[in-house]
Image (cartoon, helix red, strand yellow):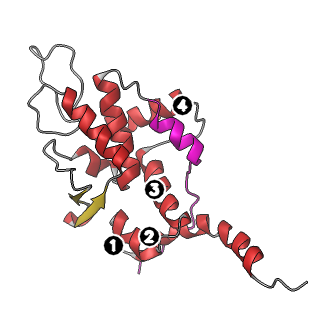
């Protein structure tokens, strides 16, 4: 079994996450695209490579879809109403024929066809929105993935379920999140244990 190093996770607060998700200007096609990307990242816990490889014909009406992750393993991810609406709003405004879900926004479609965004482009966009949202910490798509996992665990999800949702092959990989939610254990212990006066 692989040993997971005790590393500290970069995390943003719920308030910072909300500011990040609301940072894109949704009056523009680029803003609609970026809002859809950010909402999908937080709603699904996708890896940036999984997000970049999504196709435009993704059926999101069932609030779930399959994604091919690391090691070619397929897993089901679930999306929130906010993410579904953000994706629909973005796709409604697209008028190109590229089959990638997330493409670069071209000024003159007659001269250049849009192309699929790379993982690096998505990372740069996330960083830019974090700065716009006034977040001084380093924010990456992986930080949003950490926020997804931490949110689930702190709201009562069990470790095995979070492992499945993240697509981790090994539970020990998922266990890096437990020390983040362990802080809540002290409060639970105080609240419920030994109320002798």
Give whichever of 158, 197 is nearer the camera. 197
135 or 28: nearer the eye? 28
Of the two numbered discs 4 and 3 on the same chain, state the one appearing first in sequence: 4
**Is label 3 in a helix, a strand or a loop?**
helix
Q: Is residue 139 left or right of residue 190?
A: left
Q: CA distance from mark 4 to mark 3?
A: 19 Å
> Where is mark 4, residue-wise?
133
Q: Is residue 58 magenta?
A: no
Residue designated by label 1: 169
Q: Earlier in the sequence, mark 2 or mark 4?
A: 4
Q: Quadrant of the N terminus?
A: bottom left
Residue 36, x across and y down, in percent: 32, 38
- Can residue 138 be seen by looking at this rendering? no
Q: Which residue is located at x 72 percent, y 69 percent?
A: 187
Provide the secondary structure element on which disc 4 rests: loop
Q: Which mark is residue 151?
A: none
Q: Which residue is mark 3?
A: 148
Q: Quadrant of residue 92?
A: top left
Q: Earlier in the sequence, mark 1 or mark 3?
A: 3
Determine contact: label 2, label 1, CB under 8 Å. yes
> What segment is highlighted magenta in the picture?
1-23
Name the residue rendered at 53%, 64% in the picture. 155
In front of the other: label 3 or label 2?
3
Q: CA distance from mark 4 to mark 1?
A: 34 Å
Which label is found at residue 173? 2
* Dot in front, 1 or 3: 3
């Amino acid at each position: 079994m692989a040993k997971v190093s005790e590393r500290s996770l970069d995390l943003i607060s719920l308030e910072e996450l909300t500011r990040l998700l609301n940072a894109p200007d949704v009056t523009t096609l680029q803003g609609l695209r970026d809002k859809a990307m950010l909402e999908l990242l937080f709603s699904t816990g996708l890896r940036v490579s999984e997000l970049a490889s999504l196709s435009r014909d993704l059926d999101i009406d069932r609030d779930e879809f399959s994604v091919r992750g690391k090691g070619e393993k397929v897993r089901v991810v679930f999306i929130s109403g906010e993410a579904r609406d953000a994706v629909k709003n973005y796709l409604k405004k697209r008028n190109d024929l590229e089959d990638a879900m997330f493409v670069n926004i071209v000024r003159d479609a007659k001269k250049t066809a849009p192309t699929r965004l790379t993982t690096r482009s998505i990372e740069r966009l996330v960083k830019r929105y974090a700065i716009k949202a006034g977040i001084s910490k380093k924010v990456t798509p992986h930080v949003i993935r950490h926020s997804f996992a931490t949110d689930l665990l702190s709201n009562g999800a069990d470790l095995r379920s979070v492992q499945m949702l993240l697509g981790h092959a090994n539970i020990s990989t998922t266990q890096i999140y437990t020390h983040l939610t362990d802080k809540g254990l002290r409060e639970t212990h105080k609240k419920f244990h030994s109320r002798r006066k």
